[in-house]
Image (tube, rainbow, N blue to C red):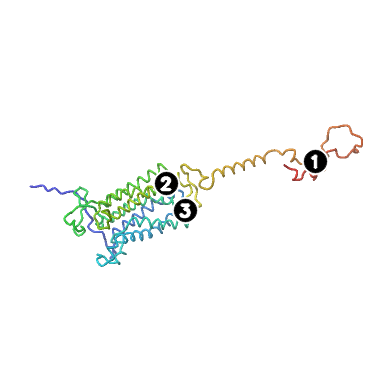
């Protein structure tokens, strides 16, 4: 009897669509929805911990998600326009609207999603950089979950491989020139793992250094584009290339450099983190900053407090002789003075002693008080 060695591999799902009462449930769409929900939960917890309200974060999600879906599809269609337009296009322009068939560019999703969130943040006067920091780890987790949709669609895999974790692809999904190969690099899995590591790194770094003013989001972009560059180089799906490199390689490299410069500038010019992220909410403690720096000039506030305390002390001091009132305040007799010889022409007995002033004299006038 001859033993047959069966190589290990990751199987592809037999189907990516299930029908419930005639209604199609597509795994690709379900993965995107699950990613959005998880990202919203993570982002809400982080935003509330920073001093914001869950209502504001949810409103940003409600507006940002449709913006992100439109941006993701636009990026895909623009960068792969030859698939939908032209005499030799394998698909029709109407197919460009069918997002459930796959084809969402993460670059457009993040860019347009941020635009939608910015519009909400501006209207509600939220600290937009703090909002970006709050949602960054959740975005990475959402991307990881969304990559499972590529697995169900048997798309966006890498070059052929005989590694034990190779992804089995059915013959009808293999690209031209690769029909003889059965297993390929599971680039969806590589990016899934990478995105989860990015999310974990962001949370740990934020917890350790209390990052703010957009630093967490900048690091998210730096980390993601670094991993995306080498993952993209493994893929064999048909895309536009320039100088032997895929278009997304150039996008990753450019965005990586910009994000790295942005992060360096933030570290140098925006230390610490925001205290107040939403109007009407209590301030949170910020590393390397003071509460005065968030709501006004801290030094000015201290000086004003000092002036107020000085004024209180001054009002508590006993009045000096200049500001004292008259010695007699009513019809009672004046305070007796020591007896002294009366000069010639002295006033008759019973007259007021010399030097006494009647009540209401100019001595009580405010013009005489210091």
Q: Do residues under tags 2 and 3 come within 8 Å of each other at their CB atoms?
A: no
**Secondary element at image label 2:** helix
Q: Quadrant of the C terminus?
A: top right
- Left or right? Give the position of 213 relative to 24: right
Identify the disc placed on residue 265.
Answer: 2
Q: Report crowding for label 2: few under 14, some 14 to 19, many 20 or more residues within 10 A (C-alpha).
A: few
The label nearer to you, 1 versus 2, is: 2
In the depicted structure, whether residue 116 falls above or below residue 292: below
Q: Report crowding for label 1: few under 14, some 14 to 19, many 20 or more residues within 10 A (C-alpha).
A: some
Which image quadrant is residue 34 in?
bottom left
For image coordinates 83% across by 34% down, the residue present is 337
Q: Which residue is mark 1?
A: 328
Q: Do residues under tags 1 and 3 come within 8 Å of each other at their CB atoms?
A: no
Nearer to me, 165 or 24: 165
The label nearer to you, 2 versus 3, is: 2
Residue 118: x percent and y percent?
Answer: 43, 56
Q: Which residue is mark 3?
A: 126
Residue 82: x percent and y percent?
Answer: 27, 63
Residue 115: x percent and y percent?
Answer: 41, 57
């Amino acid at each position: 009897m001859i033993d047959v060695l069966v190589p290990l591999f990751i199987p592809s799902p037999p189907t990516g669509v299930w029908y419930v009462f005639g209604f199609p449930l597509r795994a690709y769409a379900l993965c995107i929805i699950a990613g959005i929900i998880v990202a919203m939960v993570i982002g809400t917890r982080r935003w509330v911990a920073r001093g914001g309200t869950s209502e504001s974060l949810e409103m940003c999600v409600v507006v940002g998600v449709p913006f992100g879906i439109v941006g993701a599809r636009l990026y895909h269609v623009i960068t792969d326009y030859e698939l939908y337009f032209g005499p030799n296009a394998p698909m029709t322009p109407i197919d460009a609207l069918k997002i459930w068939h796959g084809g969402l560019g993460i670059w457009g999703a993040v860019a347009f999603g941020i635009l939608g969130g910015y519009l909400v943040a501006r209207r509600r006067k939220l600290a937009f950089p703090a909002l970006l920091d709050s949602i960054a780890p959740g975005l990475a987790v959402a991307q990881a979950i969304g990559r499972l949709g590529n697995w169900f669609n048997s798309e966006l895999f890498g070059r052929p491989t005989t590694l034990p974790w190779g992804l089995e692809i059915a013959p009808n999904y293999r690209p031209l020139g690769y029909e003889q190969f059965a297993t390929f690099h599971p680039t969806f899995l590589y990016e899934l793992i990478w995105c989860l590591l990015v999310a974990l790194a962001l949370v740990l770094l934020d917890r350790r250094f209390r990052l703010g003013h957009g630093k967490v989001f900048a690091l998210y972009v730096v980390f993601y584009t670094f991993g995306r560059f080498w993952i993209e180089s493994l893929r064999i799906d048909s895309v536009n290339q320039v100088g032997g490199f895929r278009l997304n390689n150039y996008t990753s490299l450019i965005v990586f450099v910009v994000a790295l410069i942005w992060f360096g500038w933030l570290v140098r010019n925006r230390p610490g983190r925001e205290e107040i992220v939403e109007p009407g909410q209590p301030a949170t403690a910020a590393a390397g900053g003071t509460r005065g720096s968030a709501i006004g000039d801290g030094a000015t506030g201290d000086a004003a407090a000092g002036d107020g305390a000085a004024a209180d002390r001054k009002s508590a001091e006993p009045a000096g002789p200049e500001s004292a009132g008259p010695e007699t305040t009513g019809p009672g007799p004046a305070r007796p003075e020591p007896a002294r010889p009366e000069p010639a022409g002295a006033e008759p007995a019973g007259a007021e002693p010399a030097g006494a002033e009647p009540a209401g004299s100019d001595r009580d006038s405010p013009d005489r008080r210091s």
